[in-house]
Image: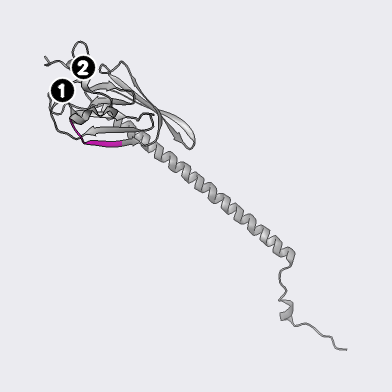
Amino acid sequence: MVNAKRPLSVLNRRGLTLVELLVALMVTSIVLAAVATLAFAMGSAYETNDDTSQKQAQVRFVTLRISELIRHCKLICGAHGDDLAVWRADDNDDGQVNIGELVYIECGSSGEHLQLCEFTSSSNTAISLDSIRAFSTDWWLAYSSDVNYTRLIPQCSSVQFGFDVAPPQSRFVSISFDLIENGVVHTYQVGAGLRGWAGNLLNQAGDGFVSDDD
């Protein structure tokens, strides 16, 4: 009687059973799901940190720029709802406001941004206080047609200006605004006092400049 035996190579060729294959697929799907979840969480965290870093950089920039402007300016010439007219400096030392010395802090009709508007004209024509109007009225076109815009915060809301007393007697200015960071509204405020306030140049009524400064 012959005892037939299968070759060893045939026995080693046995493949995976259906159950083993299903188990392997299940383990693989679990690992892939975990990797995808981790990648999504890391991407969300990166976007959150990136948005926060960008908004904080904007706040630092606007705080530095506006604080320096207010501290070193000569006068807050007027507040016109959605902007401030600031006499930046008396460059030619004539005791009067010239168009190139004037800067507007402008926030838009809905308070949706903050930007500086500066004039490039070198004209020494004096501008009376009662001639300075809201930036949106384009009154300044008679003195200069060139304006440089510096966007401080491209998107914000609820911009409000505050003063210790009404311009041009103001010695302290604050600007508050809202920023959305990662879906949450945060309120910020920038405040500064005028170190070189030129109140001695105002007349007794406070609505214009004296003809000379004794």
**Badge 1 element:** loop
User: At 23% across and 23% down in the image, what residue appears?
Assistant: 132
User: At 45% across and 30% down in the image, what residue appears?
Assistant: 186
Q: State the mark number for residue 62.
A: none
Q: Residue furthest right?
A: 1
Local packing at callout 2 (Cα closer than 10 Å; few below 14, some 14-19, many 20+) is some
Which is more toward the observer, 145 or 151? Answer: 145
Q: Is residue 50 left or right of residue 71?
A: right
The three-letter code of the residue at mark 2 reads Gly
- Residue 57, given in percent of the width and then of the height, sits at 37, 38
Local packing at callout 1 (Cα closer than 10 Å; few below 14, some 14-19, many 20+) is many
Q: State the mark number for residue 96.
A: 1
Write down the region rendered in magenta: 143-150
In the picture shown, does residue 57 fall above or below 133? Answer: below
Q: Is residue 147 left or right of residue 46?
A: left
Give residue 109's quadrant in the image: top left
**Badge 2 element:** helix
Q: Name the residue that disc number 2 marks.
A: 199
Rendered-image quadrant of the N terminus: bottom right
User: At 57% across and 53% down in the image, what residue appears?
Assistant: 35
Residue 149 lies within the magenta run: yes
* Tag in front: 1 or 2: 1
> Is residue 158 visible to the viewer in this orientation of the structure?
yes
- Residue 38, given in percent of the width and then of the height, sits at 56, 50
Q: Is residue 137 left or right of residue 127?
A: right
User: At 18% across and 13% down in the image, what residue appears?
Assistant: 203
